[in-house]
Amino acid sequence: MLPTFRPTPTCTRFQATTEMPCMKCGVPMRLALIEPQGHSYDLLTYHCVPCDSGESFLQAI
Ligand SMILES: [Zn+2]
């Protein structure tokens, strides 16, 4: 059930939208996964296609 790539949550951004620019190349990343983290937060995982990497962010519900 787990995805093959699983980046470490950076938690550096608290504002997450459906389009997040990649920190490396600036290309808008795709929202790949949403995982509930307790009652107040979702863990959003984005995937950058050109870099073939991902980032995760906590988003308050
Ligand atoms: Zn990138």
Image: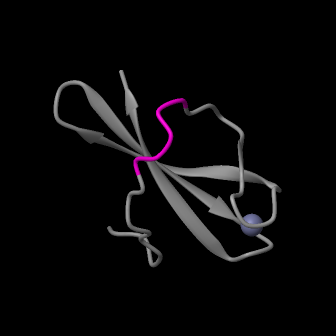
Q: Is residue 12 magenta?
A: yes
54 to the left or right of 60: right
At horizontal 80% and vertical 73% (from top left) the residue drawn is 50
Q: Quadrant for the C terminus, please.
A: top left
**Residue 30 appears at what percent x and percent y?**
68, 51
Task: Give the total number of marks visible in the rendering.
Answer: 0
Image: 30 above or below 8: above
Q: Which residues are drawn in magenta?
A: 11-15
At horizontal 62% and vertical 31% (from top left) the residue drawn is 17
For ligand 1, give the image quadrant. bottom right
20 to the left or right of 32: right
**Magenta segment, principal secondary structure?**
loop
- Nearer the observer, 39 or 25: 25
At horizontal 69% and vertical 59% (from top left) the residue drawn is 23
**Residue 15 appears at what percent x and percent y?**
54, 29
Image: 60 above or below 5: above
- Residue at the left extreme of this rendering: 38
**Residue 48 appears at what percent x and percent y?**
70, 64
- Residue at the top extreme of this rendering: 61
Image colouring: one colour
